[in-house]
């Protein structure tokens, strides 16, 4: 008899099943010993957690479900839109009766029963494989966020470009145009969204344009005269304060107007943000 060691369950992602323990040579009594020693606790029949498991894992384990879709993407830093509910995948033949509709933090729970689309055995008992998670997400998101999610999946190295193309080939019709127009240049979902919205209304937008002689590129350049920084992850933190200001001044020296847009400006205040961009482009053209 040997109780299950904590590093083992940690290596499995802080959630493990009886079957996973059995494959590593541990029996029911080893599980009992580990519970008595406080190393693991039982979440539901045949599912165990260590003390590092987070709230999503707890809810998923209690429901015998895997974390999927937007919730799986968010764990990997992939764009998942604005919906903050917990997305879980139940085994194909499980019943829907008496499933909780909200988690402990009062977030709503969205269940998927979708059969597996891409034949890949999941590597974790509690988490859906990346390609499946993205496949489900593009069905849960609207067109704009779905395309941003696909670009982001590649940018965050969650999927390869080839895997995203495979998903794209099977994706619903309303996504096909956006999928054809994908560029894997964006640092963030909001950058993808801003780029596509501006192009749709006729602006010429170039992504990640390098200014010759300078060590950095601009997220988006509109009509070759106004630069947009879309305030993705790379801009967070006080260490960015000085370099960001320096960059603004250098760009001004090149005669380039630069606007720094936050997520809120793009996703929640777009009409006034667009009006400011249009004005900046008009003024820049006139000055020329
Ligand atoms: Zn752990
Ligand atoms: Zn979903």
Image: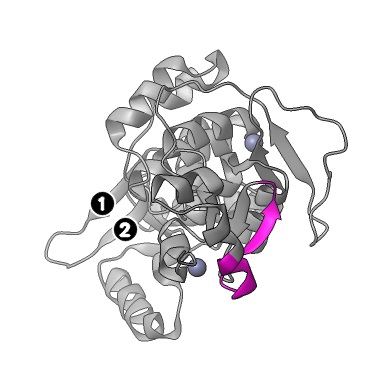
- As rendered, which of 37 and 264 lies closer to the eye? 37
Mark 1 or 2, nearer chain start: 1
Res 265 seen here: no
Q: Which residues are magenta?
A: 33-45
Q: Which mark is residue 269?
A: none
- Asked if residue 245 lies left or right of residue 141, the reply is left
Q: Residues within 10 Å of mark 1 (few under 14, many from 20)?
A: some
- As rendered, which of 94 and 180 lies closer to the eye? 94
Would the CB of label 2 be found within 8 Å of ligand 2? no
Q: Which mark is residue 218?
A: 2
Distance, label 1 to label 2, CA atoms, is 5 Å
Label 2 residue SS? strand
Return the residue at label 1: 209
* Number of on-image labels: 2
- Residue at 30% x, 69% y: name it: 251
- Note whether 214 is above or below 63 in the view shown: below
Q: Residues within 10 Å of mark 2 (few under 14, many from 20)?
A: some
Give how far across and how far down residue 72 sits, in percent: 54, 47
Task: Specify the quadrant that holds the C terminus.
Answer: bottom left
Label 1 residue SS? strand
């Amino acid at each position: 008899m040997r109780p299950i060691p904590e590093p083992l369950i940690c290596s499995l992602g802080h959630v493990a099943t009886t079957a996973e323990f059995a494959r590593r040579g541990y029996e029911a009594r080893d599980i009992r010993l580990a519970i008595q020693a406080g190393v693991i606790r039982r979440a539901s029949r045949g599912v165990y957690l260590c003390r590092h498991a987070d709230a999503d894992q707890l809810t998923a384990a209690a429901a015998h479900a895997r974390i999927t879709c937007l919730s799986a993407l968010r764990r990997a830093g992939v764009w998942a839109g604005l919906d903050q509910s917990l997305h879980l995948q139940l085994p194909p033949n499980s019943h829907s009766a008496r499933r909780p509709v909200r988690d402990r933090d009062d977030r709503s729970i969205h269940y998927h029963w979708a059969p597996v689309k891409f034949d890949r055995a999941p590597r974790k008992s509690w988490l859906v494989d990346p390609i499946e998670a993205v496949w489900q997400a593009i069905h849960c998101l609207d067109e704009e966020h779905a395309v941003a999610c696909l670009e982001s999946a590649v940018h965050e190295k969650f999927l390869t470009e080839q895997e995203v193309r495979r998903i794209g080939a099977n994706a619903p019709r309303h996504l096909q145009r956006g999928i054809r127009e994908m560029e894997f240049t964006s640092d963030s979902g909001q950058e993808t969204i801003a780029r596509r919205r501006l192009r749709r209304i006729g602006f010429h937008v170039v992504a990640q344009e390098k200014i010759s002689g300078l060590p950095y590129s601009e997220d988006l350049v509109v009509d070759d005269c106004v630069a947009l920084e879309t305030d993705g992850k790379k801009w967070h933190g006080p260490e960015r304060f000085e370099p960001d200001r320096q960059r603004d001044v250098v760009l001004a020296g090149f005669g380039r107007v630069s606007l720094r847009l936050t997520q809120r400006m793009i996703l929640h205040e777009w009409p006034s943000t667009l009006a400011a961009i249009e004005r900046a482009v008009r003024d820049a053209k006139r000055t020329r």
